[in-house]
Image (cartoon, rainbow, N blue to C red):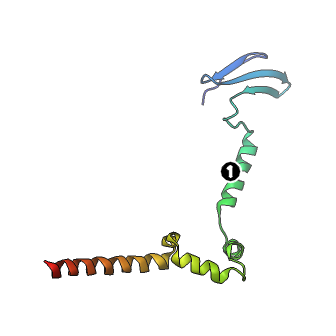
Amino acid sequence: MLVLSRQRDETIMIGDEIEISIVDIRGDKVRLGINAPTRIAVHRKEVYDAIKRENTEASRLGSTDLDTLAQTIKPGPARRGQRTNNLISSPAAITLPTTKVSLANNLINTSSQESSSKKDTA
Protein backbone atom coordinates (compact mmCIF):
# COMPACT_ATOMS: atom_id res chain seq x y z
CA MET A 1 0.00 0.00 0.00
CA LEU A 2 1.33 3.41 -0.92
CA VAL A 3 0.89 6.00 1.84
CA LEU A 4 1.13 9.67 0.83
CA SER A 5 0.89 12.90 2.79
CA ARG A 6 -1.08 15.67 1.11
CA GLN A 7 -2.31 19.04 2.26
CA ARG A 8 -5.50 20.85 1.33
CA ASP A 9 -5.85 21.59 -2.41
CA GLU A 10 -3.10 19.10 -3.32
CA THR A 11 -3.76 16.27 -5.76
CA ILE A 12 -2.81 12.63 -6.30
CA MET A 13 -2.90 11.11 -9.79
CA ILE A 14 -3.68 7.44 -10.44
CA GLY A 15 -2.63 6.64 -13.97
CA ASP A 16 -3.46 9.32 -16.52
CA GLU A 17 -7.18 9.49 -15.84
CA ILE A 18 -7.93 9.44 -12.11
CA GLU A 19 -7.31 12.53 -10.03
CA ILE A 20 -7.84 12.64 -6.26
CA SER A 21 -7.81 16.07 -4.63
CA ILE A 22 -7.83 16.98 -0.94
CA VAL A 23 -10.81 19.33 -0.74
CA ASP A 24 -11.01 19.97 3.00
CA ILE A 25 -9.61 18.79 6.32
CA ARG A 26 -11.74 19.22 9.46
CA GLY A 27 -10.47 17.57 12.60
CA ASP A 28 -10.19 13.87 11.94
CA LYS A 29 -12.12 14.01 8.61
CA VAL A 30 -10.65 14.51 5.18
CA ARG A 31 -12.87 15.41 2.22
CA LEU A 32 -11.67 14.05 -1.09
CA GLY A 33 -12.63 15.06 -4.61
CA ILE A 34 -12.31 12.28 -7.17
CA ASN A 35 -12.20 13.00 -10.88
CA ALA A 36 -12.46 9.81 -12.94
CA PRO A 37 -13.92 8.75 -16.30
CA THR A 38 -17.56 7.66 -16.13
CA ARG A 39 -16.62 4.12 -17.22
CA ILE A 40 -14.81 3.69 -13.89
CA ALA A 41 -17.13 3.17 -10.93
CA VAL A 42 -16.12 5.06 -7.79
CA HIS A 43 -17.75 3.95 -4.52
CA ARG A 44 -17.04 4.09 -0.81
CA LYS A 45 -15.76 0.70 0.37
CA GLU A 46 -18.92 -0.12 2.35
CA VAL A 47 -21.10 0.66 -0.69
CA TYR A 48 -18.84 -1.43 -2.95
CA ASP A 49 -19.06 -4.38 -0.52
CA ALA A 50 -22.87 -4.08 -0.43
CA ILE A 51 -23.04 -4.06 -4.25
CA LYS A 52 -20.86 -7.17 -4.47
CA ARG A 53 -22.97 -8.94 -1.82
CA GLU A 54 -26.23 -8.08 -3.63
CA ASN A 55 -24.82 -9.24 -6.99
CA THR A 56 -23.70 -12.54 -5.45
CA GLU A 57 -27.13 -13.13 -3.90
CA ALA A 58 -28.90 -12.21 -7.13
CA SER A 59 -26.79 -14.67 -9.10
CA ARG A 60 -27.90 -17.64 -6.98
CA LEU A 61 -30.98 -19.56 -8.10
CA GLY A 62 -33.20 -21.17 -5.51
CA SER A 63 -35.59 -24.06 -6.15
CA THR A 64 -38.58 -21.70 -5.97
CA ASP A 65 -36.91 -19.41 -8.52
CA LEU A 66 -36.75 -22.26 -11.03
CA ASP A 67 -40.42 -23.11 -10.46
CA THR A 68 -41.41 -19.47 -10.94
CA LEU A 69 -39.32 -19.24 -14.09
CA ALA A 70 -40.87 -22.44 -15.46
CA GLN A 71 -44.37 -21.03 -14.89
CA THR A 72 -43.56 -17.79 -16.69
CA ILE A 73 -42.19 -19.40 -19.85
CA LYS A 74 -44.90 -22.03 -20.40
CA PRO A 75 -47.14 -21.36 -23.42
CA GLY A 76 -50.77 -20.53 -22.78
CA PRO A 77 -53.46 -23.22 -23.16
CA ALA A 78 -54.71 -21.88 -26.52
CA ARG A 79 -51.25 -22.06 -28.11
CA ARG A 80 -49.88 -25.16 -26.39
CA GLY A 81 -50.65 -27.61 -29.24
CA GLN A 82 -49.60 -25.18 -31.94
CA ARG A 83 -46.31 -24.39 -30.22
CA THR A 84 -45.46 -28.07 -29.68
CA ASN A 85 -46.03 -28.80 -33.38
CA ASN A 86 -43.87 -25.84 -34.37
CA LEU A 87 -41.06 -26.99 -32.08
CA ILE A 88 -41.01 -30.47 -33.55
CA SER A 89 -40.79 -29.26 -37.17
CA SER A 90 -38.62 -26.24 -36.44
CA PRO A 91 -34.82 -26.26 -36.93
CA ALA A 92 -34.60 -24.56 -33.53
CA ALA A 93 -35.66 -27.88 -32.00
CA ILE A 94 -32.01 -28.87 -32.09
CA THR A 95 -31.57 -27.04 -28.79
CA LEU A 96 -33.92 -29.42 -26.99
CA PRO A 97 -32.09 -32.39 -25.44
CA THR A 98 -34.65 -35.01 -26.51
CA THR A 99 -34.64 -33.66 -30.04
CA LYS A 100 -30.84 -33.72 -30.14
CA VAL A 101 -30.86 -37.42 -29.39
CA SER A 102 -33.49 -38.20 -32.00
CA LEU A 103 -31.77 -36.00 -34.60
CA ALA A 104 -28.44 -37.65 -33.80
CA ASN A 105 -30.03 -41.09 -34.21
CA ASN A 106 -31.59 -40.02 -37.51
CA LEU A 107 -28.22 -38.74 -38.74
CA ILE A 108 -26.54 -42.00 -37.73
CA ASN A 109 -29.28 -44.04 -39.41
CA THR A 110 -29.17 -41.85 -42.53
CA SER A 111 -25.38 -42.02 -42.85
CA SER A 112 -25.35 -45.79 -42.27
CA GLN A 113 -28.08 -46.19 -44.92
CA GLU A 114 -26.07 -44.02 -47.34
CA SER A 115 -22.93 -46.06 -46.64
CA SER A 116 -24.74 -49.35 -47.20
CA SER A 117 -26.35 -48.08 -50.42
CA LYS A 118 -22.92 -46.92 -51.65
CA LYS A 119 -21.54 -50.39 -50.88
CA ASP A 120 -24.45 -51.98 -52.76
CA THR A 121 -23.80 -49.89 -55.87
CA ALA A 122 -20.02 -50.45 -55.76
Q: Nearer the viewer, residue 26 or 20?
A: 20
Q: Nearer the viewer, residue 1 or 78?
A: 78
Q: Is residue 5 above or below residue 43?
A: above
Between 30 and 40, the one lying in front of the other is 40
Kind of residue at disc 1: Lys
**Is residue 79 visible from the viewing direction of this image?**
yes
> Where residue 41 sits in the image (x, y, percent)?
69, 38
54 vs 112, left or right, is: right
Residue closest to the eye, 69 or 57: 69
The percent position of residue 9, horizontal first and vertical second, equals: 78, 16
- Residue, far front: 121
**Which image quadrant is residue 25 in?**
top right
In the rendered image, the quadrant that contains the N terminus is: top right
User: What residue sits 70% from the left and 33% below the top?
Assistant: 38
Determine whether 97 is above or below 44 in the image.
below
Whether residue 5 is visible here, answered yes or no, is: no
Rendering coords of residue 18 (x, y %): 66, 26
Q: How many marks?
A: 1
Q: Is residue 91 left or right of residue 35?
A: left
Crowding at dot 1, Cα within 10 Å, few <14 / some 14-19 / many 20+, comes out as few
Residue at the spot of label 1 = 52
Question: Which element carries disc 1, helix, strand or loop?
Answer: helix
Q: Quadrant of residue 42?
A: top right
**Picture quarter containing residue 59?**
bottom right
The residue at 79%/17% (across/down) is 8
